[in-house]
Amino acid sequence: MKKAIALLFIMAGFIIIGFAGYEIYQTQAKEKEALEMARELVFSKEQSDRSFEDTLEDFDPGDGDVIGILHIPRLDADLPIVQGTHEDDLARGVGHYTGTAYPTDGRQILLSGHRDTVFRNLGKLELGDTFEIHMNYGTFVYEIMETDIVDADDRTVIDYSIDEELLTVSTCYPFNFVGSAPDRYILHAKPVE
């Protein structure tokens, strides 16, 4: 009887590990596909032939659309940016919080991602490091000026009253926490002229 119970636990462990491995594989595949779509959107020959004004005028993403690439030089990371922060969007890359601005809008841009996928190394960034946002209408560089840790329920990081361009990047915190993290790690970055 003890052997049967032990065998049952071992089999359950293999099933759980197999399921977790499959989930990781699926997430990586979705992120890779979204990044390929983003590269085509941002760097295609057809796109480079269009004027800034025409491209910006046609820019009207819908929920779930791939809209750009977040490049983090210090981490040598290229991450797809997806419109929306629904769980399906965040499974594909970095989510752009609907209702916040885009580069050149002169307001707050809010990007969010999971600490255990796209932002697993975000804690390695320091003040002065940069983010590059590649959109189909240009590349925009932002320098990290401030970091903050807030409660997971704190919605004050979303500030629609900001009237200057500000990139806010958020993820769950602490980075090595198992389960739903109680806090959020926030980075604020200003445009580099």
Image (cartoon, rainbow, N blue to C red):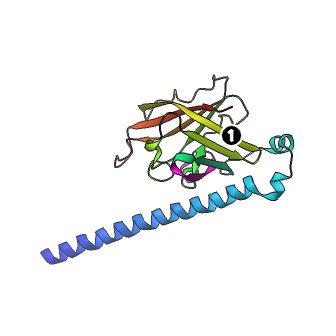
Depicted 169 relative to depicted 26: above or below: above
Figure check: 17 above or below 131: below
Can you say whether 161 is above or below 88 in the image? Answer: above
**Residue at 24% from the left image edge and 70% from the top image edge:** 9
Please give the name of the residue rendered at 47% of the width and 44% of the height, measured from the top-left corner: 122
From the viewer's perspective, is 152 left or right of 98?
left
Q: Which residue does the image show at 38% across and 38% down from the upper left?
A: 182
* Residue segment shown in magenta: 75-88
Residue 1 visible in the displayed image: no
Circle 1: element type: strand
State whether residue 152 is above or below residue 69.
above
Q: Position of residue 63 (x, y in %)?
A: 67, 47
Report which residue position mark 1 lands on.
140
Q: Residue at x 69, y 59 (%)?
A: 37
Spot occupied by residue 155 in the image (x, y as percentages of width and height): 51, 30
Left or right, 12 with reference to 181? left
The amino acid type found where label 1 is placed reads Phe
The residue nearer to you, when weighing 44 against 175, is 44
